[in-house]
Structure formats: structure tokens, C-alpha cells
Image (cartoon, grey):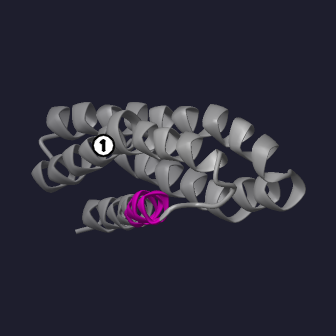
Amino acid sequence: MLLIIYSILIGYMIFFTLCIAPIINNTLDRENASKLLRKVFPRNFLFGLVLSILAILVSFILEQNTSLIVAIFLTCLFLLNLYYIMPKINTISDKDKQRKQYSKSFKKFHLFSVVLYLLKMLASIIGIILIYN
């Protein structure tokens, strides 16, 4: 069951990174891309949050302590993205719209969000590897 959960996590994150986000950014103008991404990202992070909480429960039931640590780490990162970084990015972006360019603050928080996303992908891969050890 843990293998399935971690595989879904890494699979959907790779799909979103390689397919969904680039298509949105390359197809829509900045304003419409922003509107769509503001609808998609919360669902993206919420989906990951639900899966990581499920991984916590399954890890606890199966007494997989290393997986439990990975799942808790993932949950914390999804919570951070969903409830702190994403709202902060949106607030900064709203202010930047008037200037028609992204500020250093926006770029900093966006980069932080991307790094966290990559960490979540790596943690999901580590979760899969730990299952086989």
C-alpha cells in the first residue's frame, strides 16, 4: 500500500511539472495563466497533503518508522506550500500586477516553492526506496 501511495505522489508531481504547468504557461497569457494556476495549485497541494496523511496512517499501522518520518516530512511540506507559501505568492503577485513585472520577493517565494516541490518529489522517491530495504 505504501508503494502505491508514494508512486502516486511522485507520478502526479512529475506529470504536473512536465505537462500541466508548462502547457498552462505556454498557452495562456499571464493573467489567465495566473487565474488558472490559482485554482489548480491549491488542489495540487491538497491532493498531495491527503496522500501524505494517508502514508502517515499506513506507515503507523504497518509500523514502518522510516516511512512514517518521510510521510510526516511530506505532510509538513504540503502544509507549508498550501497554507503559507502559496497565499504569500498570490499576495505578492497581486501587488506586482500593477507594476507589470515580477518582484524579487515574488521570485524568492516562487523559487522556495519550486525547491519544496522538488524536495517532495525526492522524499517520495526515498519513500519508495525505503519500502524495499
Residue under label 1, please give it. 80
Q: Is residue 113 magenta?
A: yes
**Res. 80 image quadrant:** top left
Residue that appears at 24% across and 37% down:
56
Q: Tell which of 6 and 42 is nearer to you.
A: 42
Residue found 86% across the figure and 51% down from its top: 28
Label 1 element class:
helix
Residue nearest the observer in this picture, 19 or 81 = 81
Query: Main SS of the magenta segment?
Result: helix
Q: Amino acid at mark 1?
A: Leu
Residue under the point 37% across and 68% down: 122
- Describe residue 68's horizontal placement relative to residue 21 as left or right: left
Q: Is residue 14 above or below residue 76?
A: below
**Residue 92 position within the rendered picture, expressed as x and y whole percent measured from the top left:** 48, 46
At a point 31% along the width and 59% down the height, the residue shown is 127
Residue 88 drawn above or below residue 15 = above
